[in-house]
């Protein structure tokens, strides 16, 4: 050890002792000693790692060299153009959205037929027509929440179709023709229930609409015509009764007026005599 190092150590020890002896400088000296010790430990560890790293690298290099000499690997096969993967072009955000839209549309087109709502028959909402001597039309009931409600309202819709046909074929007075419910059911040739979701109260609910094909064949047309004739006869009888009542009332009125006149004349004559 050189003289300068000995002198430096002695000076440091003297400063350390003097600093520890003085209460004012004691905390500073203790902190400086701790900082110096930690710094020395840090630099010692770093220096040790730097010294040991070249040695480990040399040992690893020697091992690799020995393994390389012992078994040299075979040269890799040349890459063929067939196995080389082509570079994919970069896809922008617009291209990605376009591909997503096309895929969604394709999936919807290829969806199973069970998910597609059934198509209504041709007669639903078709215009009334005459075919082979039969008058054909259609009526709709609903929408309601259940099929039972549609069945309950169906006779009223059928009665409306009867009134419409009677008015068109027999005149306005025949629109008052009424048929029993069992006879109205015979007019139905086909039924089709339509279920469609609707927005009710802020939520979606399936609603049922019932479509009925109404056919007026020759027997039904004859019955409606007979009912219209009976209705006209009852109306005619009612009018005759009303006419007779009016005439009878007029006659009674005239008799009452004549009786009142005669009574007034009789009282006046008696008054003059007295």
Image (cartoon, rainbow, N blue to C red):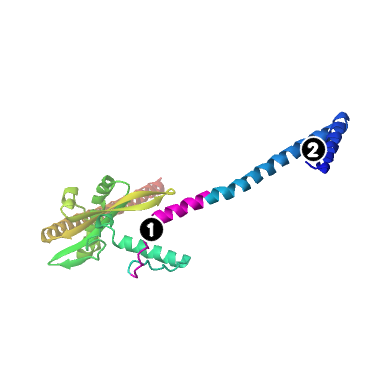
Residue 196 image offset from top left, x and y in percent: 32, 53
Residue 17 image offset from top left, x and y in percent: 85, 31
Neighbour tally class for label 1: few under 14, some 14-19, many 20 plus, Cα within 10 Å: few
Q: Image point 79% across, 38% down: which residue?
A: 32
Residue 191 appears in which quarter of the rendering? bottom left
Q: Which mark is residue 32?
A: 2
Q: Regarding mark 1 in the picture, which secondary structure is present there? A: loop
Neighbour tally class for label 2: few under 14, some 14-19, many 20 plus, Cα within 10 Å: few
Q: Earlier in the sequence, mark 2 or mark 1?
A: 2
231 part of magenta stretch: no
Q: Image point 43% across, 64% down: which residue?
A: 96
Q: Which mark is residue 192?
A: none
Q: Image point 26% across, 62% down: which residue?
A: 125
Q: From the viewer's side, name the closer residue of 109 and 188.
A: 109
**Where does the C terminus fall, quadrant-wise?**
top left
Discs 2/1, front: 1
Q: In the rendered picture of this protein, how many numbered marks are placed on residues? A: 2
Q: From the viewer's side, name the closer residue of 194 and 102.
A: 102
Q: From the viewer's side, name the closer residue of 121 and 96.
A: 96
Q: CA distance from mark 2 to mark 1?
A: 59 Å
Residue 60 image offset from top left, x and y in percent: 50, 50
Asked if residue 243 shows in the view, the reply is no
State the residue lying farthest toward the bottom.
Answer: 81
* Residue numbers of the magenta segment: 59-81
Residue at label 1?
73
**Where does the N terminus fall, quadrant-wise?**
top right
Residue 203 image offset from top left, x and y in percent: 41, 48
60 part of magenta stretch: yes
């Amino acid at each position: 050890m050189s003289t300068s190092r000995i002198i430096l150590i002695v000076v440091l020890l003297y400063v350390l002792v003097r600093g520890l002896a003085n209460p004012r400088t004691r905390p500073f000296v203790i902190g400086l000693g701790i900082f110096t010790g930690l710094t020395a430990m840090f630099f010692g560890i770093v220096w040790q790692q730097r010294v040991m790293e070249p040695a480990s690298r040399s040992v690893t290099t020697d091992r690799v060299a020995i393994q390389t000499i012992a078994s040299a690997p075979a040269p890799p096969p040349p890459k063929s153009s067939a196995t080389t993967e082509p570079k994919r072009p970069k896809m922008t955000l617009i291209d990605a959205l376009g591909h997503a839209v096309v895929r969604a549309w394709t999936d919807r087109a290829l969806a199973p037929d069970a998910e597609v709502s059934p198509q209504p028959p041709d007669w639903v909402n078709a215009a009334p027509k005459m075919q082979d001597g039969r008058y054909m039309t259609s009526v709709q009931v609903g929408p309601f929440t259940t099929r039972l409600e549609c069945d309950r309202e169906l006779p009223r819709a059928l009665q409306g179709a009867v009134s419409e046909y009677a008015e068109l074929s027999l005149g306005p007075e025949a629109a008052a023709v009424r048929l029993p419910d069992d006879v109205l059911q015979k007019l139905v040739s086909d039924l089709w229930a339509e279920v469609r979701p609707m927005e009710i109260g802020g939520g979606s609910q399936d609603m049922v609409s019932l479509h009925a094909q109404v056919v007026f064949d020759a027997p039904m047309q004859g019955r409606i015509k007979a009912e219209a004739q009976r209705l006209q006869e009852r109306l005619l009888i009612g009018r005759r009764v009303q006419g007779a009542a009016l005439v009878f009332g007029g006659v009674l009125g005239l008799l009452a007026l004549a009786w009142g006149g005669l009574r007034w004349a009789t009282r006046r004559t008696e008054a003059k005599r007295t």
